[in-house]
Every structure is written in structure tokens, then in C-alpha cells.
Image (tube, helix red, strand yellow):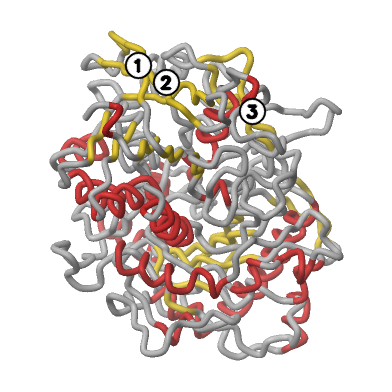
Amino acid sequence: MADDDVDVVIVGSGFAGSLIANELAKQHKRVVILEAGGGVPTNINDYMERFYTASVKVPESPYPPSMFDEKGQLSDERNDPSKMAAGRPTSLSVGPPDWADGSKSYLVQNKADKNGKWLTPFSSTYERVAGGTSHWLGTSLRLVPGDFKMKTLYGRSVPEFVDWPISYDDLNEWYGNAEAEIGVSGNVEEQSFLGIKFPSGYAYPMPQIPESLTDRAIRDALHSLDPAQTAFLGMEHAPKEIKVRGLPAARNSEPYRGRRACAGNSNCIPICPIQAKYDPTITLNDALNHKNVKMMRHTVASDIIVGDDNRVSEIKYIRYRLDENSKVVARAPGSIKAKIYVIAAHAIETPRLLLMSTKGPHAANGVANSSGMVGKHLMDHPYYVAWGQVPMTSNPVWPYRGPLITSGVGDLCDGPFRSNRGAFRVDIGNEGWNFVIASLAKASDPNVTTIDFINGSNRSKLNPKLTSLFGPALTGTLNQNISRQFRIGFLVEQTPDPNNTVTVSSKFKDGLDLFRPEISYSLSPYARSGIVAAHKFKNLLFQKMGATDFTDVSDDDPTRWTETIDGKQVKLNYTGAGHIMGTYRMGTNEKESVVDSFQCSHDHDNLYLVGSGTFPTGGTANPTLTIAALALRTADRIVKRV
């Protein structure tokens, strides 16, 4: 396909890029996708083999480039960010001790800002393979209507908030289209809360995934509450019951579009072994089945060129080739022209590319950046995690049955309290203590608990007498302990802080000689207050369940801080939810935003910047369904222009 024949160039083939490419393909548009990573594999056997043999089963472990040597051990050379053609942050590099070491961590993170303010890690990660969100959980929540008008509702108390240029009603139809495309299992009645409405007669594509025994135990604990115990939540009325609702998920509860139903492998992250969970390679394959769509893999966009007419005229790229050890052995520059350009490289790589592109008078501060807003307002959902064990007198909750998460608490996502603190949503984990003790024990359960009772150690805190067991005594003790383990997680709302930024490093480069992204990040008092409220909710829940609280915070955790809560000194922390938002937000004011409601650049009318980077505020819902809905809406607009 020659440049003259290209209607649209898309950089990135994740959720937004794949969905837009497929919609354009249906209308016979000529599309070229530039993909930094590899193409779509013919099957996932290599991914599964890499995951099975990995010594550390972090979310990145199945995916190329491999983090491990031929023996399954972590390789320093393979994880050197200066040698990676398409670098990525990993779970091991965004935490202690390497998070602020640019020689070891792909994200170059600052410990303090230029004024000396102490900063904390941005600890979310992402992939850069075709459809790089294969390791997502699958949760497909809609934002609540209040999330779209935070300035109107709460801006008097929280001046950082802005309104979206669209409302929930503007996205309602597109949400439905997205749910059909990716295949969401859910229940309309369960999801009709806090103003969320569906078209008359609407039904999710598939029935809701059944609740787990852990879900049921928590639902029963929250069924009857004393309003005096829940007044701290700051709702309009202190609740007497807090509902546990099934979570809509892009995971098949029954066969859908040729994909089999979920078998409950408890391994949605990092990889569904039977592909019952949707991932973008499914839509990407559909798009590539059209003769007018071409994908250039191992192709990294390096520069966006703006012409004298203030329109994007071409994108320059670097194509590279790897050897069997993921080492760059060849690279070649190139460029491509089209009528319209779509940057779908998510909320860190997109601003990095825009800010790297500084050629010409219309891009002196970077492409699409006349407002100076590119790279600002970086957000996540700071994730506060707690874990406990139900008492022997209660029924076991039997973790490791079903998908990782099937239910949660969403009714606390909006209310008058948002004038004072961040909202939170509660995830209920079905995987016991699988990952929550990893930061403390440098391994995950059930291995940690098992080894404790074999070796007489106590990394899990379940074996304080350092007992060593074997035979029936060992299996009986493990059954008693593991069957009663559970965990919950709180996705906390974060303000769009202009000091939380993505810029381009002036020091550290990747394997293609491109400067890497540099991050400055911290939590505002608003977000920290949301975590304090989450801690109080955890205490209430554990009390109602009669559960023993094993939540612990390591002293070397760089996200740790201390709060006085109900007269006690409490150590709190957070981790990343993987929900990278902000950095090129949408709005109507060209001086205060980067794109319009259709995700088209205010500065260059043939440039679209898509994905969760356009979110003006973050709410508490996982962003993926909204990314998909916005992408379909944007694709519809592009189709009408080419």
C-alpha cells in the first residue's frame, strides 16, 4: 500500500487502535497500523510456556520481550531498558529498590520535584506488544454520570476538577456498542445504580458471571449495618446496607463469537489460558482480515511532522529486528503519509511521542501542545489492598475458584463526600493471598504459606511458632489456612494534578536511541483522604466478618506514609491499578485541554489522540470500557471525514 493510498495511519494496536482500525476497515478505508511490538501470534502457546517456566510470575512474564533466560531466571541483560527497542515498565522495576533508578527502570522517575517536594512511585505498568492489554483483568464498568461533571458538582471545594465536554447520555449508546464488540457478561439491574441508566429493553451480551463464596461472605457481612458505623463514609444518608454487586466483565459466561466460556482458572492476569477473556488481538485480527488494513510490526513512531498548513503531514518511524535473545540487531528509519493520523499509544507513550516531535514552527513545544497541557494531569487509581482470614467458626471462603474478581462494591463511588475526599470502589479478590504478600515475602501464595509450614518460617505471618510440618499434619494445616484467606482492593479517585507529569528524559535512552518517558508523580491530600476512608471501611468489614487482619506495609515501601486514624498511628500505602489516565485531556477550551470530545487535536485537525489519556477526570471505574466507547465514537467521526 503506497503512501498516496493510505486514508488513516494508526500508531498502536491496543484497545483504541484496534477498535478504530476495525471500524474503518468495515467502511473500506485504507489503514496502516504502526505497532511497536510484535504482531499477533498464531496461538498463545509461547506465552503460556514462558509463563509456566518463569521464576517470577509477574503480569509481564508471559509476554515478549522475555524477562527471563533459558532457565526461567530473571536476566539483567534482557531487562536493561537502554537496550530495549520497545521498552516497558515492569512490576519489578516500578517498586523498590529500582523505581527511581533510570539505569534499571524504563520509566525515569523523579524522587523530588524542582521545588524539593518529595515524590512517590508511579507504579502502574503496560505492555508494548500487539494489543498490549492482553494482561488486563476484563472488568468493564461504565463511569457513573457524576464522573462527567466533577467541576459542576464538586469544583467549588476541589478546584482541580474539570467537567468532561460530554455527558453520560452522550456515551450511553456507545457503551452498548462497546459491550457488544468486546463481549461483556453482566446484569442490567445490578448495574443500575448512582444514576447509571440503560436504553429500554437493553441486555448485556451475556449473563453475569456467578458470584464466588468470598463474594457471598462479604455480601452477608454488609447486609445489615448500623448507620453510626457508616457515617464516616459521608454519603447523603449513612447506609444501613452496602450492596455487593456482580462486576460486568469482558469474559464469556457462555460461548460468544467463537470463544469458549470461562472455566474459572483464577489467572485472568496475566493471561487467560483458554482465551475466554476478550483482548484487543481479537478485534485486531478482524481488522487485518480486511485487505485494506496493513500492520507494520516492530515499528516505533519517532517523530510527528507538522506542515506549513498546521496539519500533520507524515509520521517518521524506526523499524527494527531482534535476534533470538531479544537483542536489536538491525534498525532502519522510514516515514508514512496519510490523510488522518491516530495516536493510540496510551497515556504515557502518546505524550512522549508528541513531546519528542518538535520540528517546525507549529511544534516548538511539541505536537498538539499549544495549550502546554500535553503530559500533564497524569492519573491512576491508587490501589489500597488489604487481606485477612475468616475465623474457624465461619464457613471457608475457598479462594482460587472462578475468575480473579467477580463482584465488588460500587455504590460508594459518588456522593457529597467528593467535596472532601476521593471516592473509592471495592474489588473482591477470588485469589486469596496470591499476590498481596509478594511485596513482603518476595513470592506469592499459596507457595509462601506452604513453604512456611514446611520450613518453619513465617513470611505469611500464619506460623508465628515456626512450626515445621509434613504429611497429614501439613495438608490439614494448609487446608485450614488457605481455604479461609481473602483479600480486597480499593480503587481510589485521584485529582487531575498538573504537577503529575509525563515528559521526555534528557538523559536516558532506549535501544533505538530515543529518549525515554520521565515521570513526576505524587498523591494529593484528596486522594490520600480517600485511602484513609478505604482503611476505615476495611476495618468495618473485617469486624463484621470476624476476620483477622493480616494487612501489612513494608518499611521499605516508597509509597508508605503514616496517618493518625481514630487515635492510632496507621501505616498506609498504595500500588498502581494499571489505569493510566490523563496527559492529553479533552475539553472545549483550547487553552485548557488538548483534544475535543471526539478526541481530535485542537491544534491539528487531522490528528486524533485516543485512549484514556483524554480523560479529564478518573472516577473509580476501570477505564477500558470508556476507552472502547470513545474509540467507537471517534471512528464514526473519522469515517465521515475520509
Density class for disc 3 (Cα within 10 Å; few <14, some 14-19, many ≥20) is many
The vertical placement of 398 against 282, above or below, is below
Residue 545 placement (x, y as % from top left)? 56, 78
Relative placement, left or right, of 531 versus 208 is right
Label 2 close to label 1 by CB (< 8 Å): yes
Amino acid type, residue under disc 1 in the picture: Gly
The vertical placement of 221 against 633, above or below, is below
- Total marks shown come to 3
| Residue identifier under label 1 | 334
Tell me if residue 580 can be seen: no
Q: Between disc 3 and disc 1, whose residue precedes? A: 1
The vertical placement of 124 against 548, above or below, is above
Relative placement, left or right, of 310 versus 565 is left
Amino acid type, residue under disc 3 in the picture: Thr
Q: Who's the residue at 50% across and 77% down the image?
A: 218
Q: Between disc 2 and disc 3, whose residue precedes? A: 2
| Residue identifier under label 3 | 503
Q: What element carries label 2?
A: strand
> As drawn, which residue projects farthest toward the front?
309
| Residue identifier under label 2 | 316
Residue 366 placement (x, y as % from top left)? 62, 27
Q: Residue 84 falls in which quadrant of the image? A: top left
